[in-house]
Image (cartoon, rainbow, N blue to C red):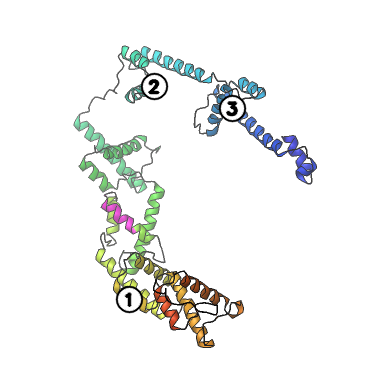
């Protein structure tokens, strides 16, 4: 493959100078390179791990295990050429690999079983403890082979984890208070209760904090303890410091808005910060669902935050509507914000959510309800202007004399002939003596009512 590429590189015209180098050769060359690269990765794995049984989904090279499995399948089907087969077997890959893996797994289990049989409660190593926990899990999930379960039962294996002896209530209470005091000390230094999960300053405190979250999630933490931790500003959701910073940034933006406007009810799509209204809405939703942290609720309420501003929001929406409607009436050409507002009114009209009074006022102001209707009205106005100047509706097709308008006229004739033209449009065109055909004889209006 390298030889072919070298020849192609030296050639000024590519494959043309080497007619004997086919596209198939090039593709096979790339395929061979990829295969040899995978084999090299497997050999490196064997050098490091001592075997070629790559675990599925191995994070360092997730595709390598799939490649090895494919090679075994090809070996079993007899679909591997002799050269590759020899390289694979030299590397230790063969169809018999599955049986070898099972033998190795059984040998490992037997070794741990022997260690368990020889152990006492004071000599259990971390490796053996993990193995014991795995056997319990496998039996509970129905995945432990019957012969292994029988061997463990014969040794009196305990399938449930022995519970630790209960502490005296006063001892447990004192231990809890000591941990709470450690959390207070942490807050006095760092300003919050966000103890990192692997904080090197006090690993026991970090574990205790995590344990309290777990107890509350399971419904096993007493209400008075929850309230005490809430008063301290405890973080139940283990939010990251960066997320806290983002919340503080949003709170600062809301505080600035409240100082400027006298309230916290940010309108949707507020131009200065379009995402702030969504954040405000999320705080209300979190409080309704009971997941808003008490300290955050207190901070929001310090800004006179309204948790259910239904009436005030309606009043502000009405005021905004009237402001935009006044801008519509006074503007000759709508700006981008006004155009978006008009589009929103069209959507409300289409969904049947626009009041009759607002619909009437918008129609009187010249708002067309669909962009297609708006374009039709514009072309009709052009045709009226043409008639005032020329005295008729016979617009030539020549582009310099109104080609776009002439094409629109042709489309109206075609729609009329096919019965697709609305009756009110037919009536308006008839009123200005519209010519319904470019031929000498005009069309009859017998089917105009269809």
- Position of 111 with respect to 405 (left or right) is left
Give the structural element (helix, strand or loop) at label 2.
Answer: helix
Q: Does the image show residue 61?
A: no
Q: Quadrant of residue 41?
A: top right
Q: Helix, strand, or loop for circle 3?
A: helix
Observer-nearest residue: 380 or 227? 380
Q: Which residues, given as a range, are shown in magenta?
A: 280-289
Residue 188 screen position, x and y as percent: 33, 47
Relative to 179, does residue 349 appear above or below in the rendering? below
First in residue order: circle 2 vs circle 3: 3
Q: How many marks?
A: 3
Residue in the image at 59% along x and 77% along y: 397
The answer to whether residue 337 shows anywhere in this view is yes
The residue that disc 3 covers is 42
The residue identified by callout 2 is 131
Foreground label between 1 and 2: 1
- Categorize mark 1 by other alpha carbons within 10 Å: few (<14), some (14-19), many (20+): few
Question: Which of the marked residues, 1 or 2, is nearer the chain's N terminus?
Answer: 2
Whether 75 is drawn above or below 226: the answer is: above
Q: Tell me the quarter of the picture where residue 219 sits.
A: top left
Tag 1 secondary structure? helix
Q: For the point 50% across and 87% down, which residue is it? A: 388
Kindly report the distance in space between the C-alpha atoms of the residues bearing marks 3 and 1: 76 Å
Residue in view at x 66 percent, y 22 percent: 82
Residue receiving disc 1:
360
Say if the magenta span includes residue 282.
Answer: yes
Front label number (2 vs 3): 3
Per the picture, the main secondary structure of the magenta-coloured stretch is helix
């Amino acid at each position: 493959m390298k030889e072919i590429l070298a020849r192609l590189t030296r050639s000024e015209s590519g494959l043309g100078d080497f007619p004997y180098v086919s596209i198939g050769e090039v593709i096979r060359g790339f395929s061979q390179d990829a295969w040899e690269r995978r084999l090299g990765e497997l050999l490196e794995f064997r050098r490091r791990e001592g075997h070629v049984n790559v675990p599925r989904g191995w994070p360092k090279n997730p595709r390598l295990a799939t490649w090895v499995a494919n090679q075994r399948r090809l070996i079993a089907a007899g679909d591997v050429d002799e050269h590759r087969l020899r390289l694979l077997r030299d590397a230790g890959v063969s169809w018999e690999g599955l049986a070898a893996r099972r033998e190795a797994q059984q040998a490992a289990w037997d070794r741990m079983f022997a260690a368990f049989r020889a152990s006492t409660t004071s000599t259990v190593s971390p490796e053996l403890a993990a193995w014991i926990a795995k056997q319990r899990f496998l039996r509970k999930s129905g995945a432990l082979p019957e012969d292994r379960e029988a061997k463990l039962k014969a040794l009196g294996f305990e399938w449930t984890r022995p519970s630790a002896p209960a502490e005296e209530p006063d001892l447990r209470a004192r231990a809890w208070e000591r941990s709470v005091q450690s959390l207070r000390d942490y807050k006095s230094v760092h300003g919050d209760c966000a103890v990192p999960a692997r904080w090197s300053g006090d690993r026991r405190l970090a574990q205790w904090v995590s344990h309290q979250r777990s107890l509350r999630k399971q419904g096993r933490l007493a209400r008075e303890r929850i309230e005490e931790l809430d008063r301290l500003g405890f973080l139940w959701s283990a939010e990251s410091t960066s997320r806290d910073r983002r919340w503080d940034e949003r709170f600062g933006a809301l505080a600035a808005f409240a100082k400027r406007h006298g309230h916290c009810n940010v309108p949707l799509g507020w131009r200065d910060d379009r995402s702030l209204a969504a954040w405000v809405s999320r705080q209300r939703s979190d409080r309704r669902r009971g997941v808003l942290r008490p300290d955050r609720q207190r901070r929001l309420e310090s800004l006179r935050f309204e948790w259910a501003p239904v009436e005030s929001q309606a009043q502000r929406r009405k005021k905004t509507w009237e402001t935009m409607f006044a801008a519509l009436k006074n503007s000759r050409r709508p700006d981008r914000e006004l155009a978006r507002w008009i589009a929103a009114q069209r959507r409300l009209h289409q969904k049947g959510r626009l009041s009759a009074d607002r619909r009437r006022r918008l129609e009187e102001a010249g708002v067309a309800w669909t962009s297609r209707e708006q374009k039709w009205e514009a072309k009709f106005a052009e045709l009226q202007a043409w008639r005032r100047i020329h005295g008729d509706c016979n617009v030539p097709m020549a582009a310099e004399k109104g080609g776009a308008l002439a094409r629109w006229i042709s489309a109206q004739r075609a729609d009329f002939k096919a019965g697709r033209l609305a009756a009110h449009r037919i009536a308006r065109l008839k009123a200005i003596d519209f010519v319904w055909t470019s031929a000498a004889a005009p069309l009859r209006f017998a089917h105009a009512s269809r």
